[in-house]
Amino acid sequence: MIENGDERALAYLYRTYSKMVRGYILKNSGKEEDIDDMLQDIVVLVWEKIACKEFVLYESTQLSTYIYSVMKNLWLKRLNKQSKFTSHSIEEHDTPDEDEETYEDMQKSEIVAQAMQHIGSTCKEILTYFYFYKYSMEEIAEKLNFANAQTVKAKKYQCQKKLEEIIKQQYNALDLL
Amino acid sequence: MNENFTYWSDLVDKKLQNKLSEQDSSAFDALITENPEFKKFYETQKQFAQGIKMAERLRLKESLKIQLQEETESASTAKSRFSYIFWLSQHSAAIWLVTISTVIALSSVLLYRTWQHQQQKKQIALQWQKAEDLLEEPNKKQEVILSKPDSPITHNASPANKETTVNKPVKPAPRQNFNAYLSEEAIIPKNKNEDNDKKLADDVVVIEKKEKTKTEDEVKTKTNNAGIPAQVLSGIVEEDKVENEKKSSAKLKKQANKEEIVQNSSIKEFYLPVYALRIQDEVQNKNFTATPEQIRSGKDMPRSTKSTTGPKIFVTQYTDKKVQEDNVWYYDFTRDSAGEHLFIYADFEFQSLQLYIDRNPSPVKYYLKTKKGVFALYPNQTQKLAELVSDKKILKYVE
């Protein structure tokens, strides 16, 4: 379902693993209000991973095991963020992890995400397939019925420029880029 | 620059998609370190990539929320539908219950009304049947019954009384009085009894005519056979004749008076005729039905043949102006052996009369049993009783 892009799989994953997630979070210093956010993040992340063509689940590994590991990592990251945010107020000069997004990066990502709502559907699909699902140019050309990968590449360049213009119209370019 | 940009762009895309080979990766790292312009380009592209990922994640989350919301709504809709169906089933059950109860109640009322109507019809039919029976047998329903008590009658009248009786002639009722009564029938509103009344009246007239043709000897013989002293009977007959002659002249006048009385009377039931008087015949131990003529004349009445001193009861119609005016008729019961006169009133409200004669105590007691009770009658109180009746006072019940 996920590989075919059937988004009903999202609800299926949510319902199937909600009990497991709930139990894990409540046992690990979590609260009731954390469960829904965590479930959504886990489901979307699993969807993202599985949707990538490179995702391979070994035969000996069950999906629930993979989801459990995703949940564990996500929850630990969140706990780390919470602890760092708390300690950050105490130790102001603490340097962030390279892999971790900074608050500034988060803000910039949100600006781009909002700008994505204003570009055309084709641009949105090309950029999403490329950056989110990590499709190759050939794959995108095949999926969106483009002539070839070069055409997709040129179109992608145009879409990026368009996105950049939208952002620059709303925000000061110097602030963002 | 264009070449550089294309190169950088491909390199950044590979980096962002993690498709850099080990060789490219080292070149990439050197490029970032050495070229600040590329570093800026990479950072910008990286921000774009992060933003695009965030946008898709937000879209997927929104899609998930919508699906969950739809599922919740459909579940709640299904629940509400189930609840509605459940409510409807309960409600329909209640409706059925109320409907069935109403139908049962209405059916019960209808059946009860039908049953009641049928009962009323039956009662009306019975009443009609009774009325028809009454019309068919008026003599039976309206006759006056006289019977003796269960204990054997033993006559114990004193000789003194006998003498008194013999010497005292009985006052016979004038025949025109009964005829006058019969003539009153025309005044009474016509009903189905009218034919019977007329028939009876005709019978009485025939009897009267027959009696007129009878000789005195025949009367004497009959009474002698019955055990009545000839002197008494002849005296009665003589008296009857005299009285008839005396009052024949006043017949028309009395009839006129009678009609006037009847018209003025508010109690018409007093004029209900007594067609016959049933008397227990002590000799034959059977009831004897006396015709009005027999009652009036006292002839052919039952009597005792066992003993000459046995009771003979016959009835004459006592006539008195005052009594007639009060619309009360009296019957004079006379025992020939004792010579006593016992006035038995005939209140025509009573549709049956029974005379009980108890001879054990002295003097002889007579009980008049009516529908209103049993009344003791004493020979010396008859006049008083008659006055009570004439005053329309109810006699006290005597055990």
Image (cartoon, coloured by chain):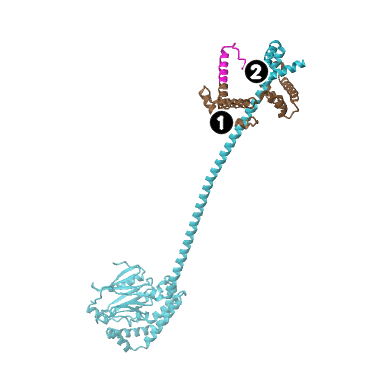
Chain colours: A brown, B cyan
- N-terminal of the pair, mark 2 or mark 1, is 1
Give the side of residue B203 with respect to residue A177, left or right. left
State the extent of the magenta-drawn residues as a range: A76-101
As rendered, which of A105 and B283 lies closer to the eye?
A105
The location of residue A39, given as percent across then percent down, is 57, 27
The location of residue B237, given as percent across then percent down, is 32, 85
Q: Nearer the viewer, mark 2 or mark 1?
A: 1
Chain ID, mark 2: A
Do the numbered discs 2 and 1 sit on residues whose CB atoms are within 8 Å?
A: no
Residue labelled with disc 2: A105
As rendered, which of B294 and B105 lies closer to the eye?
B105
Q: Is residue B325 above or below residue A1?
A: below
Q: Farthest right residue?
A: B2
Task: Check if residue A91 falls in the magenta segment.
Answer: yes
Tell me the SS state at disc 2.
helix
Residue B239, quarter of picture: bottom left
Q: Is residue B281 above or below residue B86?
A: below
The location of residue B221, given as percent across then percent down, is 30, 87
As rendered, which of B48 and B391 lies closer to the eye?
B48
**The disc labelled 1 sits on which kind of residue?**
Thr
Residue B138, quarter of picture: bottom left
Give the side of residue B194 with respect to residue B166, left or right. right
Tell me the SS state at disc 1.
helix
Q: Residues within 10 Å of mark 1 (few under 14, many from 20)?
A: few
Residue labelled with disc 1: A16
**The disc labelled 2 sits on which kind of residue?**
Asp
